[in-house]
Image (cartoon, grey):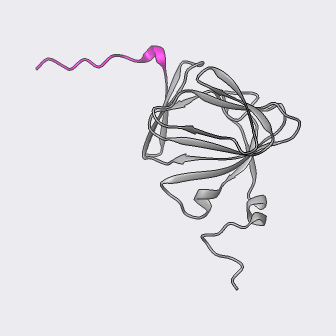
Amino acid sequence: MAEQHPLLVKAEQIAANLHSFSHPWNPNSELTGTQLGKTVGLQRTGVNFIRVPPGKESFIYHSHHREEEWIYILSGRGVAEIDGTELEVGAGDFMGFPTPSVAHHLKNTGDEDLVYLAGGENLDIEIAEFPRLKKRMIRREGAIDIYDFADAKPFEPLDT
């Protein structure tokens, strides 16, 4: 029986591929994880394995305009902030953010790692907002642009 296959990620391979990262706008963001979906060649959907240490946070309070996102807690305890409301979460809990989504964020308030699977769509264009920072991100064709809400101008068609 074959031990390896490009469409299978074994537990040992997941452990070996873990790397740490954080969100540059949140000094309390600290995660260790790996992109499982990309490892097996998924292109339209992402699946990620993530660990957040006690007292740390996932990314930053944000919302999505185009890409749906979901989170399934495997172990640990935390607080999910969803649309301004803080909710306790733990093993077996599932969150889904259909688009356009409300702002959301995850913090580890427990004494052990908060471990979860997170995933969603991988579209060619995404718009995300960071309401507390009053910033908007537009990702297209591999480029990421960040705009301040204050710089937005309403569209007014040219008179012809």
| Quarter of the figure that contains the N terminus | bottom right
Q: Which residues, given as a range, are shown in magenta? A: 148-160
Q: Looking at this view, name the residue that lies furthest to the front.
A: 92
| Quarter of the figure that contains the C terminus | top left
Q: Is residue 44 magenta?
A: no
Which quarter of the figure has residue 79? Answer: top right
Q: Is residue 112 left or right of residue 87?
A: right
Q: What residue sits 65% from the left and 51% below the top?
A: 48
Question: Who is closer to the viewer here, 110 or 22?
Answer: 110
Residue 101 drawn at (x, y percent): 50, 31
Question: Who is closer to the viewer here, 112 or 6?
Answer: 112
Residue 6 drawn at (x, y percent): 61, 72
Q: What residue sits 49% from the left and 48% below the top?
A: 122
Q: Main secondary structure of the magenta part?
A: loop
Which quarter of the figure has residue 72? Answer: top right
Q: What residue sits 81% from the left and 30% below the top?
A: 109
Residue 90 drawn at (x, y percent): 76, 39
Question: In this picture, is 75 found above or below 137?
Answer: below
